[in-house]
Image: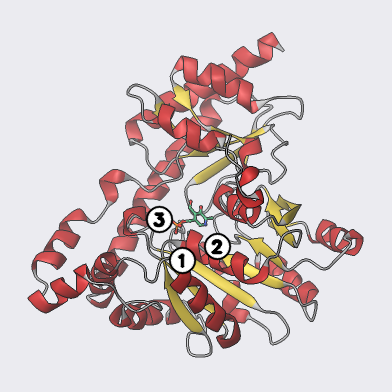
Amino acid sequence: MYAFSKSVEQLRSSEIRDLMKLATQPGIISFAGGMPNNDLFPVKEIDEIFNNLPLDIKKTAFQYGPTPGYPPLLQSLKEFLRKKGLPVDDNKLLVTTGSLQAINILTKEFIDPGDIVLTENPSFIGAISVFKSYQARMESIPVNKDGIDIGILKKKIQLLPKKPKFLYITPNFHNPAGITYSKTKRMELLDYLADKDIILIEDDAYNDLYFDDATKDMATPMKCDEPDNVTICYTGSFSKILGPGFRLGWLLVNNEIYEKCELIKQAMDACSPNFTQVLANEFLSQGKIYPYLDFLRQEYRQRKEMMDNALKKYMPDYVKWNEPNGGFYFWCELPANFDTSEIMKIAIKNGAVFVSGKTFDPAGVKNNNFRLSFSNMDKNEIDKGVKIISDSIEEYKREL
Ligand SMILES: Cc1ncc(COP(=O)(O)O)c(C=O)c1O
């Protein structure tokens, strides 16, 4: 038995990671993984980009790069983000090794053991693990259809023994809840946080994956409307679009916060992969990103519609969900006494897998929800897989 550090002692392998092993077994229809679709990656475009690079840039790609990011990528990314209305000139941009590293850097910057981090409930498992690894005390606030429950947020903050350091949220195409914050909710939240000295971490990993133009407007990052009296640290990622294999994300923060971020990153990995930064820069600067995003949105929208139809066709009437308007996920709710880990075991036996709700509860308890991911899915399997899960829920209910 080794004497592990306190910070890693409480880290456990999550159900989701253990399940990934099952999910890749042949024959199982997997709605488990939150990854983009293998068949949609821009393999041909990236091949062409690399083959046509001048030799000196190819050599640069193999080399270490500056900590803040490959300078041409910082420029092209800045333009990409400027088009979304993000305040790229008043803030500083850091290229990170996935946006999970951005969350990790911010947590290292602000959290000492026992400090309070506010999260949504449910929340992204990767971020929960990061907060745990810094021994943060997590306090979670439920998420409704239009975003975080501000009434509960207010009450919670009043009752806490000390001021939380930050609030971590995913306002667009939430993982796992599938919801998008309404404009009103965004404004209410910023109003409430005004002068509270609680940093808002806005995780926008799915920003480009909206399914219609009305949603595009609604999904405008909150950082675009950052008032003087609230600090927003904005994170984004290439993972859900170009592919997680690039391991590239970004962080947009004010100068003061940025200075420490750069030093922290230097100690973590010195720089993000130059190889993929070179490729991502060409993809952006040659304008290939925009038609590719149109293509992705269409593909994911089709999958979402197929899953919605299958849910309507097969799910018992006590199962509730709301149709996502972007991203990768349906979040289904069962009666409070249902245990989705048990249902999952039945579903696996029957040939399909999803992720049970408690994976996304920072306290690891609430388990009457489950997440269905339609992203890395063969369209032909959606209907069959949803039927298996619906039948498994009914099988579980009969045994209750
Ligand atoms: C909400 C959210 N944020 C961040 C990430 C991290 O992605 P990456 O580190 O690959 O950029 C994910 C990945 O699943 C996610 O769902």
Query: Where in the figure is residue 103, as x and y percent of width and height?
Result: 55, 63
Q: How many marks?
A: 3
The label on residue 198 is: none
Distance in Å between CA atoms under marks 2 and 3: 19 Å
Hey, what amino acid is under mark 2? Asn
- Secondary structure beneath dot 1 equals helix
Query: Where in the figure is residue 297, as x and y percent of width and height?
Result: 38, 56
Hey, what amino acid is under mark 3? Lys
Query: Which tag is nearer the camera, tag 2 or tag 1?
Result: 1
Residue at the disc numbered 2: 104
Q: Quadrant location of the N terminus?
A: top right
- Secondary structure beneath dot 2 equals helix
Say few, some or many: other residues with alpha carbon within 10 Å of mark 1 (under 14 / 14 to 19 / 20 or more).
some
Query: Which tag is nearer the camera, tag 2 or tag 3?
Result: 2
Image side of residue 151 versus residue 22, left or right? right
Question: Toward the viewer: 206 or 235?
Answer: 235
Res. 220 visible in picture: no
Query: Which tag is nearer the camera, tag 1 or tag 3?
Result: 1
Residue at the disc numbered 3: 240
Respond yes or no on whether mark 3 lies under 8 Å from ligand 1.
yes
Q: Which residue is drawn at 55% across and 42% down?
A: 330
Question: Toward the viewer: 333 or 7?
Answer: 7
